[in-house]
Amino acid sequence: MTDATTRRISGRVTVRLRPGVLDVQGQAVAGALGDLGFGPTRVRVGKVFEIEVDAADADAARVRLTEMATRLLANPVMEDFEVEVD
Amino acid sequence: MRFAVVSFPGSNCDFDCVRVVREVLCQPARLVWHTEHDLGAVDVVLLPGGFSYGDYLRCGAIAARAPVMEAVRRFAAAGGPVLGICNGFQVLTEAGLLPGALGRNRGLDFVCADQWLLVDGRETPFTRGAPRDRAIKVPIAHHDGRYFADAETLDRLEGSGQVVFRYATASGEVRAEANPNGSAHNIAGICNAAGNVVGMMPHPERAAESLLGGVDGRMLLEGAIGVLA
């Protein structure tokens, strides 16, 4: 619920496999790109979560998205994440 | 021994586990829904296989945050035996009850096959009844079973005997060609530092009746009964 002290703010959490973690999906996509004639490529597949929250300001929204990433969206064993707020 | 079998939306081996506990082990089994906050009076907890929450986000990730998992956490902290099978193993890693993570199989295939395993490492409630001088045959059926952990965690697991199942050949040799999914160190199952929480990708409940192709999995579940009897 948006009230007088908050506004709807949109942002993005980008989750990527950590460097060095085998990305079999990326390898498969790279293989398919090769088949289409794009030559040798290196592909890493990640995820983007577009999230809207009600928050007082961009900093507060960034804190919320960071907590979401930490608690659910990324698995720190294999993944890193980045938070952006519009 | 009273068993709890935890059921999430999308679990599909929960009734297989209940059947084996009741009909083969002749023990009481209670199906516990994911929204419950209390396991009831139980002695062993099984987290079954399947596709909890459609495997959305990551396998086991959403189930690991379900209300029932707080009860599983308390049960495990008190030393109660917990076995996560396949998706249940993924749930235990996502919940932080076991270290590491399970990634997409190296070959990208869903692998459904009989698999030979070597029982290894420290004794756990689920491995105490299993032979160590031969391989055991327990089927696997998964898409995301490639065990992964950083080098430091792998060293710690190996050093403390926490790797309790490894993919092996029929003659019990742990070799690269016996590894169906690219798991680090051929790891098929691990336990926590205390030894009471075990996760494994193979399905012991599918190898509990000779009519269904073997009884090696039954020994693992029977171990949990013996340890508390």
Image: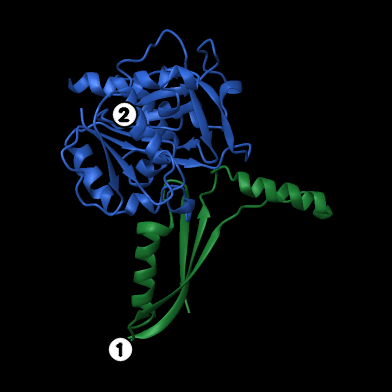
Chain colours: A green, B blue
Which disc number belongs to residue B21? 2
Q: Nearer the viewer, residue B57 or A14?
A: B57
Quarter of the image holding residue A9? bottom left
Quarter of the image holding residue B89? top left
Instruction: Identify which residue is drawn at 39% across, 68% down.
Output: A65
Left or right: residue B70 versus residue B167 is left
Residue extending farthest to the top is B133
Residue with the mark numbered 1: A3
Label 1 packing within 10 angstroms: few (<14), some (14-19), many (20+):
few
User: Looking at the image, is B30 positioned above or below residue B163?
Assistant: below
Chain letter for the residue marked with disc 1 in the picture = A
User: Looking at the image, is A39 positioned above or below residue B160?
Assistant: below
Chain letter for the residue marked with disc 2 in the picture = B
Q: What is the secondary structure assignment of the residue under circle 1?
A: loop
**Is any atom of residue B83 visible in this view?**
yes
Image coordinates of residue B152 in percent, x first then y, are 40, 34
Give me the C-alpha separation between circle 1 and circle 2: 54 Å
User: Looking at the image, is B53 positioned above or below residue B128?
Assistant: below
Image coordinates of residue A81 in percent, x first then y, are 46, 59
- Position of the N terminus of chain B, as image quadrant, is top left
Q: Are marks 1 and 2 in contact (CB under 8 Å)?
A: no
Q: Nearer the viewer, residue B188 or A60?
A: B188
Label 2 packing within 10 angstroms: few (<14), some (14-19), many (20+):
many
